[in-house]
Amino acid sequence: MPDRRPPSAAVFLLHGGRETGLGPPPPGPLNLPAARMRPFARALAAATGDGATDVLVRPARYTHRGWNGSREDPFHDAVRALDALRREAGEIPVVLVGHSMGARAALRAAGHPLVRGVVGLAPWCPADDPVTQLAGRDVVLLHSTRDRVTNPRESQSFTARARRAGAHACLVAIRDSDHAMLRRAGAWHRLTTCVVTGLLGQNPLPDAVTTALSLPPAAPATDGTLDLDRLDLGLGLGRRAYASSGHRPARRAGTGST
């Protein structure tokens, strides 16, 4: 078989965890937060690999189970992983995909020179977390409107703060789902794949996402909030909702709110 050429880009997957926990994540199938990310890894690998010039899809490894306050352990794990990738593959573009605590780590690590964008799934976005590291990056947050673990309104506010700091940011609200991304799981997987491949330039982003990412820095949070069920992803996602409700796919930002 011919040797594979080095990857032209990479996607890092950062799973969730706990607010505190100095022990290591449990091994194998006992690590449920890591297991939640495996369908995303499979979908992304299938969408980005062509057998010769694959986009590298790689899970991040945590040394500790929790965020642990000012220690910010997963953030430092993510930076170390990015540094190692840079030594391995050079200056390739990276998109970080994180869930919950992993999304917080991804957003914090976005200032790394390799990072081009972040996709945050049900992200943990404290109001006092920094945003200056996101300048020039694309940030797309996905959040269930019924999340009871992390707050979708904090995600909405975070996108506005990130825009004012120079990021290109928006939020996609997902109705009738949950923090664990079990309800409407296929929608989470397809939307994430669509956004990641769009940020890597492998296919066009949905029109509404492109518009929302182009909003001016002072745009209000609601203008950058989209409704999944009004997005046209070109993948058949949400068509039953359109058929049953009479809605047309959105073509501009500001069609939904959390």
Image: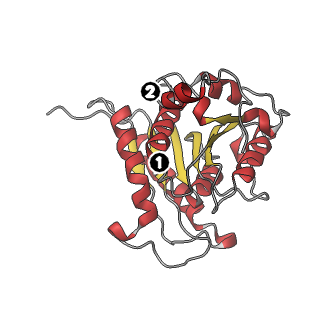
Tell me the crowding category of disc 1: few under 14, some 14 to 19, or many 20 or more residues within 10 angstroms, Cα based: many
Kind of residue indicated by mark 1: Phe
Circle 1: element type: strand
Name the spot of residue 42 as percent of width and height, x first: 35, 44
Residue at the spot of label 1: 12
Q: Nearer the viewer, residue 75 or 242?
A: 242
Name, please, the residue furthest toward the left. 1
Q: Quadrant of residue 140?
A: top right
Kind of residue indicated by mark 2: Leu
Q: Nearer the viewer, residue 242 or 15?
A: 242
Disc on the earlier residue, 1 or 2 = 1
In three-dimensional space, the C-alpha distance between marks 1 and 2, rounded to whole angstroms, equals 23 Å
Name, please, the residue furthest toward the right. 218
Q: Which mark is residue 235?
A: 2
Tell me the crowding category of disc 2: few under 14, some 14 to 19, or many 20 or more residues within 10 angstroms, Cα based: few
In this rendering, is residue 113 above or below 13?
A: above
- The answer to whether residue 19 is left or right of residue 239 is right
